[in-house]
C-alpha cells in the first residue's frame, strides 16, 4: 500500500507543479486552488485504486493488448470525473468566500486542464501496471511454491465410509452444487463440502481453469471451443461431454 501511496503522491506533485505554470498570479487564492486540486487528486485516486485493481483482473492487458483501448476509455473517464470534482470544490469555495470570484479554471478547455487530464491519465496507467505487476508476482510466487512443495497433486475424497486420495489428473471437471462441489471423473462423481473458489485456490495453476461461475475444468480434457457473438460458448471435452463457458471468464481460457 505504501508503494501505491508514493506512486499517487508523485503524480499529485507533478499535477500541482504543471498547474502552477499556468497560474496567472502567485496570490493566496491561486495557492488554495492548487491545494484543493492536490487533495482532490490524492483522495480520488486512493479511493479509486481498488476499482482499478478489479478492472485489471477483468481486462488484463498482459493477456490481450487490445484491452488497452478499454483502459484508455476508463482512464479518460475517471480523469475527467476527478477534474470535475476538483473544479466543483474550487467553484464552491470561490463563490462562498470571494465576492465576484473568477478562476482561470472556469475555462475548462485550456492548457491547465489539458495537463490535468494528461497527468491523471498517466496516474491511471501507472496504477494499472502497478497492480498488473503485483498480480504477476503473486501468481509467480504461488506457482513456485506449489511446484517446489510437490503438494496439491492429489485431493482427499470419500465414497461411503472409505476415504482415499484422488489424483487431480483424473478429475475432468468440477461443478458447484448448492453447498458442495461435485468432482467428475471417468469412474464416477465425488462430493466435497467446499466452495468452488476455495477448491480452485488449492489447485496447481494452469491445469484447471474457471470457465463459468459453476464450472472448473481440467484443460487436459478439452478438445475444442465454440464461441458465439455474445462471448459465451461451449467447451467440448474428449469424454463426449459439453460444458458452457461464460464470457466473464473467457479471457482465462487458453487460446
Image (cartoon, grey):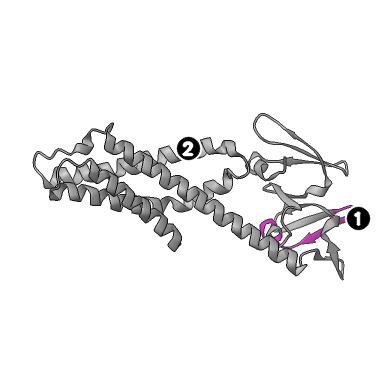
- Tell me if 96 is positioned left or right of 151 in this view: left
Instruction: Using the image, tell me which numbered label, if any, was put on residue 72.
Output: 2
Residue ID at (71%, 41%): 245
Tell me residue 193's x, y (percent). 73, 63
Which of the two labelled residues, at mark 2 and mark 1, occupies the earlier sequence position?
2
Q: Residues within 10 Å of mark 2 (few under 14, many from 20)?
A: some
- Report the front residue among 150 and 111: 111
The extreme top residue here reads: 229
Q: Residues within 10 Å of mark 1 (few under 14, many from 20)?
A: few
Residue 203, located in which quarter of the rendered image? bottom right
- Report the front residue among 136 and 26: 26
The span picked out in magenta is: 185-199
Element type where label 2 sits in the image: helix
Residue 101, located in which quarter of the rendered image? top left
As drawn, 172 above or below 101: below
The extreme left residue here reads: 99
Instruction: Report the residue marked by disc 1.
Output: 187
Tell me residue 15's x, y (percent). 31, 47
Tell me residue 194's x, y (percent). 71, 62
Task: Judge whether residue 197 is colored magenta.
Answer: yes
Tell me residue 200's x, y (percent). 70, 57
**Disc 2 vs disc 1: which is toward the camera?**
2
Residue ID at (45%, 60%): 3
Q: Quadrant of the C terminus?
A: top right
Amino acid at each position: 500500500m505504501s508503494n501505491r501511496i508514493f506512486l499517487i503522491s508523485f503524480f499529485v506533485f507533478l499535477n500541482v507543479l504543471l498547474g502552477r505554470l499556468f497560474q496567472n498570479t502567485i496570490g493566496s487564492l491561486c495557492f488554495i486552488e492548487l491545494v484543493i486540486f492536490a487533495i482532490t487528486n490524492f483522495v480520488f485516486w486512493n479511493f479509486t485504486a481498488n476499482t482499478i485493481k478489479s478492472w485489471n483482473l477483468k481486462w488484463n492487458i498482459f493477456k490481450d493488448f487490445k484491452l488497452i483501448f478499454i483502459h484508455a476509455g476508463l482512464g479518460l473517464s475517471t480523469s475527467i470525473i476527478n477534474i470535475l470534482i476538483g473544479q466543483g470544490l474550487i467553484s464552491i469555495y470561490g463563490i462562498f468566500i470571494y465576492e465576484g470570484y473568477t478562476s482561470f479554471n472556469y475555462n475548462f478547455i485550456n492548457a491547465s486542464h489539458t495537463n490535468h487530464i494528461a497527468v491523471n491519465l498517466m496516474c491511471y496507467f501507472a496504477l494499472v501496471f502497478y497492480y498488473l505487476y503485483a498480480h504477476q508476482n503473486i501468481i509467480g510466487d504461488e506457482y513456485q511454491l506449489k511446484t517446489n512443495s510437490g503438494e496439491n497433486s492429489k485431493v482427499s475424497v470419500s465414497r461411503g465410509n472409505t476415504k482415499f486420495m484422488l489424483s487431480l489428473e483424473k478429475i475432468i471437471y468440477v461443478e458447484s452444487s448448492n453447498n458442495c462441489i461435485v468432482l467428475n471423473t471417468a469412474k464416477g462423481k465425488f462430493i466435497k463440502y467446499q466452495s468452488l473458489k476455495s477448491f480452485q485456490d488449492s489447485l496447481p495453476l494452469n491445469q484447471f481453469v474457471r470457465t463459468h461461475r459453476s464450472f472448473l475444468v481440467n484443460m487436459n480434457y478439452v478438445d475444442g471451443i465454440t464461441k458465439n457473438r455474445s462471448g459465451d460458448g461451449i467447451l467440448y471435452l474428449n469424454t463426449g461431454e459439453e460444458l458452457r463457458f461464460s464470457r466473464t471468464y473467457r479471457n482465462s481460457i487458453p487460446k
